[in-house]
Amino acid sequence: MAVFGRNTSLGKTIGELAARPILEANVSPLIVDVGARNGMFLLPCAYSAMATLVGFEPNPDEYRKLAKGETDMHFWATQNDLDIPKFREERYFDCAVWDRECSQTLYITQGPGACTLMGPTLPLMKNTYFLYPWWDHRRRQSVYDVHTRVVEEREIRCKPLDALFGADEKI
């Protein structure tokens, strides 16, 4: 996304030229982040400043961090002096996105970024993937042990996007 901030021969950045029709139409780009755990850090600051971020995070602990602006990524970015994109508006929902209103089991895993609605890791897969190469036995760790092992199950609310956005909002 570094291209977004690159200058053109017209004296404007690529992002400014690409966004001009959107801004002239008085439209705020809408970014939807499903499984928003750490927030959105992938967009250039120039783009995020004109956009609205809507995040969905069903894990109660991670939702609380998002709502307070105290996610693990915020902490890491602050410690490493990195820019945290500021959005025109941010809204977070403490539910999962589904095709209808219902409740589902959220499988909260050892690594918070691996939480899932799909169920626990299949036994066949538990010792199949590793974080480091097979030859580095001192550092080799199972992805299951570090990330995907289920530590808790919770019933969570699920809602369709249509139930969360107003009739005048375009997704």
Image (cartoon, rainbow, N blue to C red):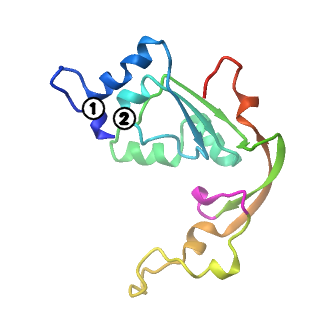
Residue located 69% across and 26% down the image: 165
For label 2, count other residues whose C-alpha is less than 10 Å away and answer few (under 14), some (14-19) or many (20+): some
- Name the spot of residue 167 as percent of width and height, x first: 71, 19
Vertical position of residue 123 compared to residue 150: above or below: below
- Name the spot of residue 2 as percent of width and height, x first: 29, 39
Instruction: Report the front residue among 159 and 38.
Output: 159
Q: CA distance from mark 1 to mark 2?
A: 8 Å
For label 1, count other residues whose C-alpha is less than 10 Å away and answer few (under 14), some (14-19) or many (20+): some
Residue located 44% across and 41% down the image: 41
Magenta segment: does it hold 111? yes
Q: Is residue 43 left or right of residue 111?
A: left
Could you tell me how many numbered marks the image carries? 2
Locate residue 164: give its quadrant: top right
In primary-sequence order, the first of circles 1 and 2 is 1
What's the magenta region? 110-118
Instruction: Report the front residue among 51 and 60.
Output: 51
Secondary structure beneath dot 1 equals helix
Residue located 61% across and 35% down the image: 67
Secondary structure beneath dot 2 equals loop
Residue located 63% across and 78% down the image: 125
Vertical position of residue 120 compared to residue 50: above or below: below
Quadrant the N terminus occupies = top left
Say which mark, if any, is on residue 44.
2
Q: Is residue 118 left or right of residue 71?
A: right
- Name the spot of residue 124 as percent of width and height, x first: 66, 82
Q: Amino acid at mark 1?
A: Gly
Say which mark, if any, is on residue 62.
none
Q: Which residue is mark 1?
A: 5
* Residues marked 1 and 2 touching at CB (< 8 Å): yes
